[in-house]
Image: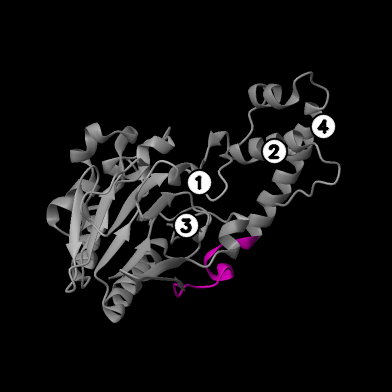
Amino acid sequence: MRAIFFSDIHITHKRPRARIDDYYSACIEKLQQIGELARKKQADFVSVAGDIYHYKSPGDNTFQCTNDLIDIFKSYSCPVFTIAGNHDLLYDSYEYIDRQPYSTLVRSGAITDVTNRSVLLVDDDGYKVRIIGVPYDKLAVASSFAYKKINEDFSILLGHIGASPEGGNFFGTKLLSYQEIVDVSEADLFHFGHLHQQFGINQVANKWFISTGSITRGTSHIENIMKQPQVAYVEFGKDYFRPTLIRLQVRDANEIFDLTQLKKVEQETNFEFFKALEDAVLMEDPVEQILKSFNLTPEIQGLVNGYLNRGEADTKINF
């Protein structure tokens, strides 16, 4: 079997404030690159772990955008298996899925949604691969990925959740660790979207995790400045598993971002952070009180909270 894995397209006609190029065209170009890669590699399927769209409200997505996506995904030389991410769901709820452009993609046959259902693929040698999607839940727990094999040789679970190799938290939200998931599941491979960080390809025990981060760069955060969007390409069978990360061809950060604006944001962030930190040390319960008492951005909250919790005199703060 051969397959390509990626997630978090966040396509929209509305240009993000930080971008100075044609963001929509950049999204389309990446998807076309992936389609060409699938053809060259003779992929058996493509897996997309959520957040095809950026805006949750149907009214914020154009008909042209959905039509273009239908044309692109239908041009792929293999099936495209997907799940809905939180940005594909109005109010983060499946109750309204039929109103969403994501549902139009599914009904067109351009993509195959595998949420709460499985698809079984069988190659010429009789090797069976089952693909299953886990519904989005912002409060997901490890047991959401509990799975027992049926009759397949290899099983793949798609999820749009907060999970990382070591776990931890992201702006106050608990991240599942890969080990927690391995402990409850018989699946062989987990393909995760949602977090835009590039955790890449990891192996825990005899299980594999793929989390390539967003293929787009919507903000001028330092992580996006440094990021090289990528997909995972995997060849696997009865006795082998060969994963590779492949970088997409994209323009340099200085060609797509207003870096002068980034410098201004960095200076403001520095000032807000140190002012908040100075105020926090005067409080009896600084971590909790500062988050309740100040109108801070999530980024500043995370920096202050993390710095105070560590309490290390030599902690280096990176912006």
- Give, as a three-letter code, the residue at label 3: Gly
Residue nearer the viewer, 304 or 11? 304
Asked which quadrant contains residue 112, the reply is bottom left
CA distance separating discs 1 and 4: 38 Å
Q: Which residue is mark 3?
A: 213
Farthest residue to the right: give it.
313
Q: Which residue is mark 2?
A: 306
Q: Nearer the viewer, mark 1 or mark 3?
A: 1
**Segment colored magenta:** 247-259
Q: Which residue is mark 4?
A: 278
Q: Earlier in the sequence, mark 1 or mark 2?
A: 1
> Quick one: SS at disc 4?
helix
| Magenta region includes residue 70 | no
Instruction: Specify whether 17 is left or right of 39.
Output: right
Residue 70 x %, y %: 20, 61
* Residue at image coords 70%, 21%: 289
Tag shown at residue 146:
none
- Give, as a three-letter code, the residue at label 4: Glu
Residue nearer the viewer, 144 or 251? 144
Q: Residues within 10 Å of mark 1 (few under 14, many from 20)?
A: some
Q: Earlier in the sequence, mark 3 or mark 4?
A: 3
CA distance separating discs 1 and 2: 23 Å
Residue 318 x %, y %: 72, 52
* Residue at image coords 80%, 46%: 315
CA distance separating discs 1 and 3: 19 Å
Tag shown at residue 179:
1
CA distance separating discs 3 and 2: 23 Å
